[in-house]
């Protein structure tokens, strides 16, 4: 049984069982997030810094990730909260939400959906999303999407022979009028002035 269990545990390549066990017993903060320990008697997995009295070493297995521990049949500890370990989305905080939002915006979500739908996709309210974007990005999601559209359109003008109307729609603008207005607001000149004369 012990041999089979030892084969199932998945340690990070740079750690061995003895190092992990010493770190767990010492509650070493330097190892927090690098591995998780599963206690066979309780079927609970913990971070190395868990404040609960440490289990006996022979009852403990080690895993590189929380997912590996859960796959082995352990459930997360309610005291040390493995979901908040360093490197996890909860530990990285609100910057993670903004980074996910930026990826969705760059993928064109706001070209076909509203800011409210973006907020729902991220699991926050629209006002909270605005506050997060203002704090971390210095601009609202709509402003970031508008800047992305103008930049995409400018690249298409410089690099393709598409008509300006085709570029407007390819860059995510809802109409040619909005395309022209965005260029006038950003560059103080019409998009046609960027076409190279041949």
Image (cartoon, rainbow, N blue to C red):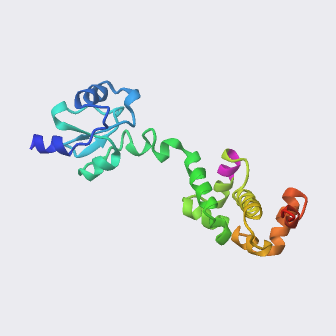
Relative to 7, residue 169 above or below: below
- Asked if residue 133 is among those painted magenta in the image, a careful observer would answer yes
Give the quarter of the image for residue 196: bottom right
Q: Where is residue 148 in the image (x, y as percent from the top left)?
A: 71, 59
User: Percent x, y for residue 197?
Assistant: 87, 64
Q: Quadrant of the C terminus?
A: bottom right
Q: Is residue 25 left or right of residue 140?
A: left
The residue that appears at 86% across and 57% down in the rendered structure is: 187
Rendered-image quadrant of the N terminus:
top left
Q: Residue 156 or 40: which is nearer the viewer?
A: 156
Q: Residue at x 59, y 60 (%)?
A: 104
**Rendered image quadrant of residue 107:** bottom right
* Vertical position of residue 142 compared to residue 132: above or below: below
Residue 84 locus on image (x, y percent): 44, 42
Residue at 58 percent across and 51 percent down: it is: 99
- Residue 25 lies within the magenta run: no
Q: For the image shown, how many numbered marks are present on the structure? A: 0
Furthest residue toward left: 1
Q: Is residue 104 left or right of residue 173?
A: left
Magenta-colored span: 131-135
Nearer the observer, 37 or 181: 181
Query: Viewed as shown, does residue 65 lie left or right of 190?
Result: left
Q: Position of residue 141 (x, y in %)?
A: 69, 58
Q: Magenta region, mostly helix, strand or loop?
A: helix
Farthest residue, direction front: 198
Instruction: Please tell me which residue is depicted at 63% across the width and 65% down the height of the picture.
Output: 108
């Amino acid at each position: 049984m012990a041999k089979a269990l030892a084969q199932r545990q998945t340690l990070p390549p740079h750690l061995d069982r003895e190092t992990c066990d010493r770190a767990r017993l010492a509650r070493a903060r330097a190892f927090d997030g690098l591995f998780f320990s599963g206690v066979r008697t309780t079927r609970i997995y913990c971070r190395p810094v868990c404040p609960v009295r440490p289990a006996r070493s022979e009852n403990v297995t080690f895993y590189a990730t929380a997912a590996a521990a859960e796959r082995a049949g352990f459930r997360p500890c309610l005291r040390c909260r493995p979901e908040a370990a360093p490197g996890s989305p909860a530990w990285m905080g609100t910057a993670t939400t903004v980074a996910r939002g930026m990826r969705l915006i760059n993928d064109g979500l706001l070209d076909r959906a509203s800011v409210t739908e973006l907020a729902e996709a991220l699991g926050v309210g629209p006002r909270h999303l605005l506050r997060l974007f203002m704090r971390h990005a210095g601009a609202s999601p709509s402003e970031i999407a508008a800047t992305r559209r103008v930049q995409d359109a400018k690249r298409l003008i410089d690099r393709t022979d598409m008509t300006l109307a085709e570029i407007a729609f390819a860059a995510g603008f809802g109409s040619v009028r909005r395309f022209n207005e965005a260029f006038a607001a950003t560059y103080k000149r019409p998009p046609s002035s960027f076409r190279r004369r041949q």
